[in-house]
Image (cartoon, rainbow, N blue to C red):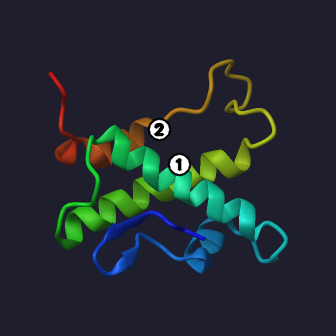
């Protein structure tokens, strides 16, 4: 149920927003979408080596957009785990990486 809380006020996006992003207008996949949404948010936070989204509207928008992009890939390619004919597993997109780059902590 979108259990990944990334700010003190609640989830990064709602189930309704996720379904709107995916262009899903039925309830059959709600549990699946929530699971993928949790995974997407967790993945973008892990990519940045953060446990929460930095404060501010800019970071919140960047993390939200990146997580929604990741959710879209997870949902669209759920059968194969691969993007189109590419033979590698789904990874965070270049666009999402660009959005998250200013907030990423690199481990050394």
Of badges 2 and 1, the one in the foreground is 1
Give above or below for 105 relative to 82.
Answer: below
69, above or below 20, in the image: above
Picture mark count: 2
- Left or right: where does residue 30 sit relative to residue 49? right
Expressed as whole percent of the image width and height from the top left, the position of residue 66 reads 42, 53
Residue at 79% in and 66% down: 29
Q: Which residue is mark 2?
A: 93
Q: Quadrant of the C terminus?
A: top left
Badge 2: residue crowd in 10 Å (few <14, some 14–19, many ≥20): few
- Residue 74 in the image: above or below residue 35: above
105 horizontally vs 40: left or right: left
Residue 34, picture quadrant: bottom right
Q: Residue at x 72, y 31 (%)?
A: 84
State if disc 1 and disc 2 touch (CB < 8 Å). yes
Q: Position of residue 81 (x, y in %)?
A: 71, 33
Please state which of residues 98 and 88 is positioned toward the viewer in this rendering.
88
| N-terminal label among 2 and 1 | 1
| Numbered tag placed on residue 70 in the rendering | 1
**Residue at disc 1, secondary structure:** helix
Residue 93 x/y as whole percent:
47, 38
Quick one: quadrant of the N terminus? bottom right
């Amino acid at each position: 149920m979108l259990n990944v809380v990334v700010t003190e006020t609640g989830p990064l996006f709602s189930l309704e927003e996720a379904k709107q992003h995916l262009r899903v207008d039925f309830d059959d996949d709600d549990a699946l979408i929530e699971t993928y949404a949790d995974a997407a948010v967790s993945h973008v936070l892990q990519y940045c080596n953060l446990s929460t989204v930095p404060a501010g509207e800019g970071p919140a928008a960047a993390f939200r957009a990146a997580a929604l992009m990741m959710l879209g890939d997870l949902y669209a390619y759920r059968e194969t785990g691969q993007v189109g004919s590419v033979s590698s597993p789904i990874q965070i997109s270049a666009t999402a990486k660009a959005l998250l780059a200013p907030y990423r902590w690199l481990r050394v």
